[in-house]
Amino acid sequence: MGRRPPRRNEMEGIEHVLPWRIKQPLLRTLMMASGPSGSGRLATRVAVWLLGGVYKDRKLLANLTPRPFISPCAQIRCADLRLGQHAFIDDYVTIYAHHDGGRVEVGDFSSLHRGTIVEIGAGGSVIIGADSHIQSACNLKGFVADLRIGNQVQIAPQCAFSPYEHTFADRTQPIKNQPLASKGPIVIEDDAWLGLGVIVLDGVTIGRGAVIGAGAVVTSNVPPYAIAVGVPARVVGARTA
Ligand SMILES: CC(C)(COP(=O)(O)OP(=O)(O)OC[C@H]1O[C@@H](n2cnc3c(N)ncnc32)[C@H](O)[C@@H]1OP(=O)(O)O)[C@@H](O)C(=O)NCCC(=O)NCCS
């Protein structure tokens, strides 16, 4: 996927330490050295300082080189983390794999915004396609089964995805000691849009291009191009062609 490099006028509003024509090659060099290691984080930190600006201003750094931008303030402990070209991992994102977790993939040009937590364990993975955007404070779990998010998916702040449940049939045992279970993976197909605070439970597929209203709890499949709202989410319409 080709994307144009940032233009000079996209720097408007960003505090300038140096003129852009001098700053751009320096930033590019720093971003080529960026990464999750200690020296890579140092390079990113210097690039952030040199760029100036705040929050999404720093997506420019992800677009300067194919290397992903990983905020120095992100917390990552995941042996199998696959970040695509131009991926953007914002401040205070956490990506955490338990010892029995699968993998986390974030595709080309996709972003995880501030405060989002990705956690995998019990063989589960979180797989995000290309050009998908997960806004702030979302909770993405890959436990027991996978969470699979397609391409060009838009996820508003404070959404949560749980492809597993606690079982609780035995009243003599604490719920925390009873096995986890899952009806299957959560699949969010390409071009879906989930509004603020949507919760998606295990085994659910949200079809291509579907729209889920703010605050919905999605407990069953939503067909492609449907509009679903409420608790539990019910289809109330369809996108017109
Ligand atoms: C789902 C949504 C897209 C529907 O928009 P719309 O097609 O213009 O629908 P309308 O506003 O005409 O509402 C249609 C009906 O659904 C209801 N409704 C709309 N959104 C709802 C929601 N989130 N939860 C419950 N009911 C909702 C309306 O009250 C209306 O009911 P009525 O027919 O009984 O009066 C929109 O309401 C929504 O929730 N958007 C998400 C906003 C958001 O999260 N923004 C963050 C952007 S990242």
Image (cartoon, rainbow, N blue to C red):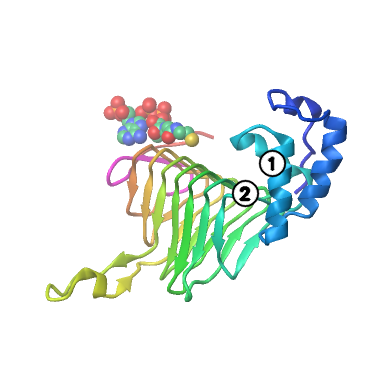
State yes or no: Cβ of the residue under disc 1 lies below 8 Å from any atom of ligand 1: no
Image coords of residue 173 (percent x, y): 17, 75
- Identify the residue at horizontal 77%, vertical 30% (top origin): 17
Residue 71 is marked as 2
Magenta region: 223-233
Q: Give the vertical position of 174 relative to 39 (above or below).
A: below
Q: Is residue 38 left or right of residue 120?
A: right
The extreme left residue here reads: 172
Separation of marks 2 and 1 at Cα, in angstroms: 9 Å
Q: Amino acid at mark 1?
A: Val
- Is the Cβ of the residue at disc 2 closer than 8 Å to that at disc 1? yes
Image coords of residue 112 (percent x, y): 56, 48
Q: Is residue 209 left or right of residue 12?
A: left
Residue 48 is marked as 1
Q: Amino acid at mark 2?
A: Ser
Secondary structure under the numbered disc 1 in the rendered image: helix
- Identify the residue at horizontal 67%, vertical 40% (top origin): 59
